[in-house]
Image (cartoon, coloured by chain):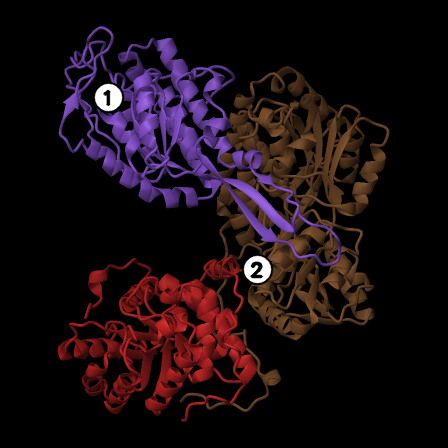
Amino acid sequence: MTDKKITMGKTLIKKSSLSISENGLEKKSSSKRLEVLKTYKIYIGGQFPRTESGRYYVPTNAEGKKLANVCLSSRKDFRDAVVAARSAVSGWSGRSAFNRSQILYRMAEMLEGRKAQFIDELILQDSTKAKALKEVNLAIDRLIYYAGWCDKFQQIFSAVNPVASSHFNFSVPEPTGVVSIIAPQGDSLLGLVSVIAPVIAGGNTCVVLASETKPLCSVTFAEVLNSSDLPGGVVNLLTGKVSELASWYVDHMDVNATIYCENDSTIQKMMREKSAMNLKRIIFYDKVKWGTDEGQSPYFIMDTQEIKTTWHPVENIAGAGSSY
Amino acid sequence: MPKTISKKKSNTVKLKFDTTWKYAPAPESKSAATIKPQYDLFINGEWTKPSGGKYFDTINPANEEKLSEIADANATDVDSAVKAARNAYEKVWKKMPAKERAKYIFRISRIIQEKARELAIIESLDGGKPIRESRDFDVPTAANHFFYYAGWADKLEYAFPNRSTEPLGVAGQIIPWNFPLFMAAWKIAPALATGNTVVLKPAETTSLTALKLAEIIQESDLPPGVVNIITGAGATGAAIVNHPDINKIAFTGSTEVGKIIQRAIAGTNKKVTLELGGKAANIIFEDAPIDQAVEGVINGIYFNQGHVCCAGSRLYVQESVAKQVIRKLKDRIESLIVGDPLDKNTDIGAINSRQQLETIHKYIKIGKQEGSEMYESSCALPGKGFWCRPTLFTNVAQSNRIAQEEIFGPVLAILTFRTDDEVIEKANNSPYGLSAGVWTDKGSKIFNMTKRMRAGVIWANTFNKFDPSSPFGGYKESGFGREGGLHGLLPYLNLVG
Amino acid sequence: MPAVKSLYPSPDFSLSPRIDQVGVEERASRFTKRSIKKETKLNGLKLVLNMIDLTTLEGKDTDGKVKQLCYKAMHLHDAYPGLPTVAAICVYPSMVKVAKNALGNSGVKIASVATAFPSGQASRDVKIRDTKYAVANGADEIDMVISRGKFHAGEYNFVFDEIAAIKEASGDARLKVILETGELGTFDKARRASDIAMHAGADFIKTSTGKISPAATMPVTLVMLEAIRDFYYATGKMIGMKPAGGISKSKLALHYLVMVKEVLGEDWLSNEWFRFGASSLANDVLMQIMKEKTGIYQAANYFSVD
């Protein structure tokens, strides 16, 4: 657990309670106690099931060491996740924006509390200690950033429109619904947080495919989500192969938008074609440098919002004049 | 045996609210709250003795008992506070990355939430408002205000198209006694979020929750000097207003003092926002949802003992439904409980001070002399302390003083109207313009009314609703500047092209 | 007592009443902030007990089941003497005779549902005979259902005439009219249905059959209490109120009492004018009474589940 007291610029990190040695799965601790190994499951509807297909794959780090037996999710897992995401839409988008902001802030609190665990996992996945610390800090701060936007982006992007007829006319953003997301492959924690936060800050729910090569943080991040008062189904996290699942992510008729973060042009073309079936919105974040300030902005929120305009008459008594 | 159909005329039919089944006292325990016997000034992150060595008592208006001693800051103390604020601004706060600033403000909000119960109890003890209100409204909304504004700190580049922003520097803030902690939040949160530092003076009768907030600010590790809280009365306030090294004054209080402040800063470069008095018109049309309108009127004038600048103190009811509405109002006030602020069932607490009670009595006398009919509820009043029953006046005319002057108590003036343009004219016929209420089921009428009312906040089919994201402030002599929402950032910033 | 169709001028039922939902819910939630302690709580709990219509309305009800329910109605918890009985038991018409024999002179009334409860989808003739059968077997009170389909189709005269006809068929029995507010959908409609029922001759208006969700809620009950109040002011006639279904906890029942106290006052705070349609509420009230008496939190196994 990190020390809560943050004096300007300095943070105190206590050592992680998980003594994962440098050898990855081969545990060699100095005491005689045998470590309990973590099972990496997927996250659907607020629960942690295994993949219904029973399959697994074993990602390795740059030196070829095995990271874990990770669920190789199937199209049926994706289907179930979309059902969970859809049923969570009305509850999540129906909450007050302020309530959403409190929940995103709580996610930051939970992530801050588990910093050491994430640093260890990032190091296992080829990061250095300094880079890992930077990445985790940025991920926490990014959650707080988007927590702050939940109840403010509306004020920037809405409008009262001065129509020429005697009507009160206003335009507001509304969440598009269920968003399927193929998360960035590198930046396995920061990239994940950077695509999820704006989507849910805007009131949408999502089904996310974690980085294929670096999936550990995403599953642990699901645990953070689960302990943050975030309702089940708002974020669903799968692990598996992009090549297998990409087309399922993009042609599901009950998904309103798809986000893809890599620059494989074959996949991009396929997505554009298949999305035509229900005209889902296609969003590519292939050029974003997640590690910089460029990786966060309210425009990411607006990418998954629709604009609704409403008209209502204004009767004219005690004064001349048309619209509001 | 079922009652036979009575041949009673409907005007002799009466409901009896003084029932055999009565509410037993339900006192909130004071043990969750700690009040020190004496408080000093919070300057530069530390508790400092007042340089004049003077303290004054603060009492509980429900029983006139002393709660604590509050330091009286003189001009020297004000100067120390402003120096601390200036130093913190130049050396620390101005240079800190915005997102780090935000995190301090988030912390303050979270700690307020953790200490909510203690703050609510102290608020009720010090000011007289019912514990239910402190607990359910004042404290949570104060916490929410810090939370909302914390989020703006690192997003100012988006708030004003084609402009970048600069903080003003040091803000001097003076707040009233009707919502002590809530007003402190309204002032401090946007100031900090926009990068300014603060010298705040709470009202002399209700300083305790601001001082508790100082303890919370200390606990949050906010750099010393960023927020300074100094207590005192009018002279302390004047010293703040007149201090040459303050860039901005924010004042909430009476129109009279607001005008004094505006004169005092003439010829200086100080920016100012004023949130002053009001005499809000609450308008019920014949096609209103009547029962909900009655409830809205009740909330509008009796909530917080009527000590609300935006209180709906003038009711304009369309003549065709006047009798019905007045009867319902009279029934409704019978179930309002005036009592010990710490009793969880109290609806209307103590009047904040002896002076305020005298002012209210003065207006009630004037109302009777002017020929209006006074009606008050029949509830019991406690012995010691300052109390006033919910009161309403019928047959009030536009030219009566009770329809024009702010009473700041649980007294409602009821006037009738016949047509839409008549009520628009009468509602606007006031030097004040803080808020207004409109009750009608018809959408197009709502928007016509909200468009015509010359007031800064219009409540349609509701009243007394506040949200950190919703701008609040007045027209005309109710002041200028907005607090809350995106617009609430402007008063604390310079926009740079 | 003959049905009273034209004693007072009826409002125009085709005009929708104006009820603001947000305002109603705010007012209703205010009642839940009242703190009910000590003797207020104990007296309130006893009042709640005495206002319960202990109910069994299942396809699988038998003579034996109803007899046991009647015993419970008269002997809620003999371990604590001095408790009141419930107000009534509420059963299907076919069980009225059994209940009458079981209840004897205990003072507990027999309420019978009727008129093709719960759907109300049957002919006028069937509904009248259903009612008369229950009354003939000894029902003191009739709980009828309105025709929601006709209501939604705008046939308010039909709804009105039906209530008046059932009132006539009820003879001396008091008539409760169930609006089934969960099927009406909005507070405007609940108010309109309340007004129709009262003008057509209802002695009580009742929220629900308890067979669908939502059943009784505080906001819809508030709307109905205000309808009763306005009717009382217009005519001088008292009408009773019965929220039914979904009230299984004492705390909630006490909130309802607060609402009755602050909207209608003293005269309605008795089982002659206010009832709770409930089954498991009684045991929760008993547990709370025992907690008040002993200071110890209770467990369900110490109270009979009939």
As shown in the figure, which amino acid type bears the numbered disc 1? Ser
Secondary structure beneath dot 1 equals helix
As shown in the figure, which amino acid type bears the numbered disc 2? Asp
On residue A243, the disc is: 1
* Chain purple in the figure, letter: A
Q: Report which colour depicts chain B.
A: brown
Q: Is residue B472 above or below residue B80?
A: below
> Which is closer to the viewer, label 1 or label 2?
1
Percent position (x, y) of residue B82? Answer: 72, 25
The foreground one among C207 and B42 is C207
Percent position (x, y) of residue B211? Answer: 61, 36
Residue corresponding to mark 2? B347
* Chain red in the figure, letter: C
Q: Is residue A158 above or below residue C149?
A: above
CA gap, disc 1 and disc 2: 64 Å
Quadrant location of residue A91?
Answer: top left
Quadrant location of residue A273?
Answer: top left
Residue at the farthest top position:
A63
